[in-house]
Image (tube, helix red, strand yellow):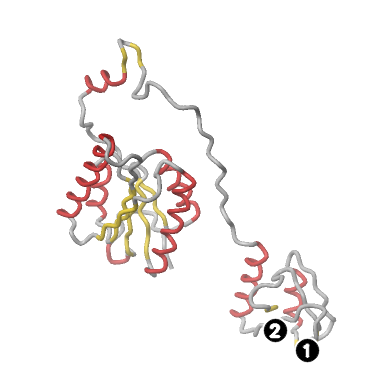
Amino acid sequence: MPTKNSSLTEANMSRPRDIMIACVTVEVAMVVSPVLRYKPQELHLFRFIRDPGSRKSKLYTDHFNEVLRKISSSLPSCRIIEHSDEPVYEVNRMARSLDKLYCRISKDNDDFRILANLSSGPSEFAAALGIFSYVHPCVVLFKVPTREYAVSQAMLEEFNYDNGVPVGLTRKTYPPKEIAGIRLELPDERRLRALRLYHSMMESGTEPYLFRPAGRDTVPFPVRSADLDRLRTAEQRQANIVPGTRCNAVQCRACGSILNRTVF
């Protein structure tokens, strides 16, 4: 099962397989330095080119190629997988893409943790990573603080001021764009309760009983008094249980019609 370590600096002996996720726009050190620090066995790099062939696309492509060059030369054992089909500036699509990626990772690995770089990519990508880490407990978020900027303080002031008036790096904007609600599909509560009951009975050595929907031909099944107590105390139940040691047509909302028609 995937595990989540509270610290990123635990000993390698007990550390699971490390898989890192990052986004590449126009930053190189923000992506490369944590890769060289943690040395993941697998690296998933997200990027997206809106208008291929333009001057702006060359800017993004050059930075991405430089990231690849530095990681490949310094950590050749790291397997790098590029993801360029999904726009990294759309939260909903990135959240779904990350969830699909998790399914593939968990299918191929038994024990792993995912290191997610919050400092790489646009704010929408960081938001998707936050949702991703909330849903999957084996995801470890980390940020990369800047020690030194590539431009001087004088250049920063020049970029952020216009004739002495502070304007920032953005001069004009498009109208605000609302983000559609992101729905997290949580497990059905009845299914969880049924699984919990199933687990407790299996731990105690109790054999589950075959379920027959009400209204069909049924065969009496032996029921222990302890099992009846568990069924009675299960929330959201609807049971037709004959007192004693036998019952007919048991139907309980603790499990509904799930778990392969099994009642516990």
When the figure is inspected, residue 145 is found, relative to residue 219, above or below; the finding is above
- The residue positioned 33% from the left and 39% from the top of the image is 51
* Callouts 2 and 1 close, C-beta under 8 Å: yes
Q: Quadrant of the N terminus?
A: bottom left
Residue 219 is tagged as: 1
- Three-letter code for the amino acid on which mark 2 is drawn: Leu
Q: Quadrant of residue 235?
A: bottom right
Q: Could you say where residue 108 lies in the image, as x and y percent from the top left?
A: 37, 69
Identify residue for label 2.
Answer: 210
When the figure is inspected, residue 189 is found, relative to residue 168, above or below; the finding is below
Q: Nearer the viewer, residue 171 or 253?
A: 171
Disc 1 residue crowd, few under 14, some 14–19, many 20+, Cα 10 Å: few
Image-based side of 246 in relation to 93, left or right: right
- The residue positioned 75% from the left and 64% from the top of the image is 236
Q: How many marks?
A: 2
- Which of the two discs, 2 and 1, labels the residue nearer the N terminus? 2
Q: Quadrant of residue 16?
A: bottom left
When the figure is inspected, residue 104 is found, relative to residue 226, above or below; the finding is above
